Image (tube, rainbow, N blue to C red):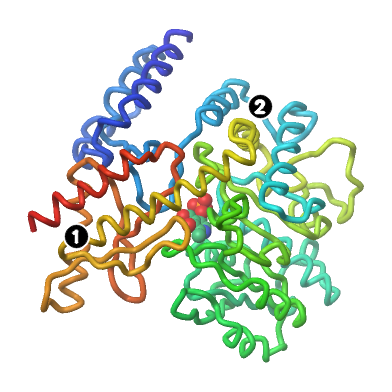
Amino acid sequence: MNRALELAWHGATEWIEGLEHRSVGATASLADLRLSFSAPLPNDGTSAENVIRELIDEAKSGMHGSAGGRFYAWVIGGGLESALAADWLVATWDQNAALYSSSPASAVIEETAGEWIKELLDLPRDASFAFTSGCQMAHMTSLAAARAALLKSVGWNVEEDGLFGAPEIRVLTSDQRHITIDRAVRFLGIGRNAIEQLKTDEDGRVSPAALDSALADSSKLTMLVLNAADLNIGACDPFRKLIPMAHAAGAWVHIDGAFGLFARASRTHRHLLDGVDLADSWATDGHKWLNVPFDCGIAIVRDREAHRAAMTSSASYVAPETAARDQTDWNPEYSRRARGIPVYAALKELGRSGVEALVDRCCAYCTEIVEGIGALPGAEILARPTLNQGLLRFGRPGASPEQNDAVTDATIQRINATGEAFFSGTTWRGRRAMRVSVVNWRTSEQDVTRAIAAGAAVLTRA
Ligand SMILES: Cc1ncc(COP(=O)(O)O)c(C=O)c1O
């Protein structure tokens, strides 16, 4: 056993050390990977050492360097040293962190991690929380609490009676929402047709006028889901105006703050999220800006009773809390790993000031990359970062928008093929764009220079 662990340790540290000079994008093709891994189920076993050696040798060319500082695609953080090491320990301890009794230390460490997160993000200290597999499951957890509370307010117990015959619920949300909102709504049995899209203004924010006209219909119970940084341009809705309007209409307000909520830790950027703490529930991720390894989401709910009612596996609606915290009262899973332990480690390693520095650094680097590549021939800045997300587009003079969509996608591919940086494409306001997302603690000034140089190598050769 130890030999396999030693190999894994060497493979892991070599991988981390190689992040700086290896190609950021995976280099193996689908055919290569199938050649390595598609095989019949073995009849007889092989030594653990051989299994790990083969995994290390064969998988690495099919892995992106997303743990490194030159990866700017989607919104994917890296793993802080303490968080990664803590994650290894979580796997090694192999606890079932469902109950205090099944892993006492996990329960108490996660309890502290949840309290620290609420304090860092400056959200209500008496709110309940859960460490989920990601932001989508944090949405589902939060909206399950919303469903319980809204229906309870009209005398319907959804936990006992389900949704058949229940009063209708609708979900008002931004036209710039993340797709995981729709999935959470589907999983809760509310259905995608219950979603009513609110138009955003030129800054990507839901306008008070759009909400006002939607709220004029008071025939249904209402959830409102707002963005604390949308995935494309990091737009934050005007919470201080919208949330009181929604509350006056009896709506539950939920916030998608998958990465953006962490801007609350920055004195420079927290004004962008002014009033976000007025909401009823919040979903965020540990595996994005906090830089804990995949996977870790966090749900925070103001109405503890509704949260517990929606998630607990105990029969009683308002079972008294015992002295210790059983995670299964707050989480959608029963058996689970202790995802909060890497969060505890990350917060302890960084401290409040370290999170603030990380957020500010990422925002500054994002602006540098967007402006640096945006100044190159054939590039256009579509959205200058207000936070850590920006958009670029590429094109040729006189070409049609459709042709420039193709140019944009081809340019992204060519930049990625340099191996120096890795970006993803997105569709924004109907047109293709390159998204620049900076959330990794490892990203350095040198990485930024390399990204701009990769853009220059492609665009000046075009
Ligand atoms: C704004 C936003 N919301 C939600 C999600 C979904 O997060 P997860 O993949 O952790 O479920 C993402 C992921 O990129 C996101 O950027």
Question: 12 or 144: which is nearer to us?
Answer: 12
Image location of residue 388, percent across then percent down: 45, 55
Image location of residue 124, percent across then percent down: 77, 55
Q: In the current view of this chain or complex, which residue is farthest to the right? A: 320
Q: Which secondary structure, mark 1? A: loop
The amino acid on which the numbered mark 2 sits, given as a three-letter code, is Gln
Identity of the residue drawn at 89% across and 37% down: 323
Image quadrant where residue 64 sits = top left
Q: Which residue is mark 1?
A: 376
User: How many discs appear?
Assistant: 2
Residue 21 located left or right of residue 150:
left
Image location of residue 226, percent across then percent down: 59, 69
Question: 141 or 397: which is nearer to us?
Answer: 397
Between the residue at mark 1 and the residue at mark 2, the CA separation in whole angstroms equals 52 Å
Q: Is residue 209 above or below residue 331?
A: below
Image location of residue 405, percent across then percent down: 21, 70
Q: Which residue is mark 2?
A: 95
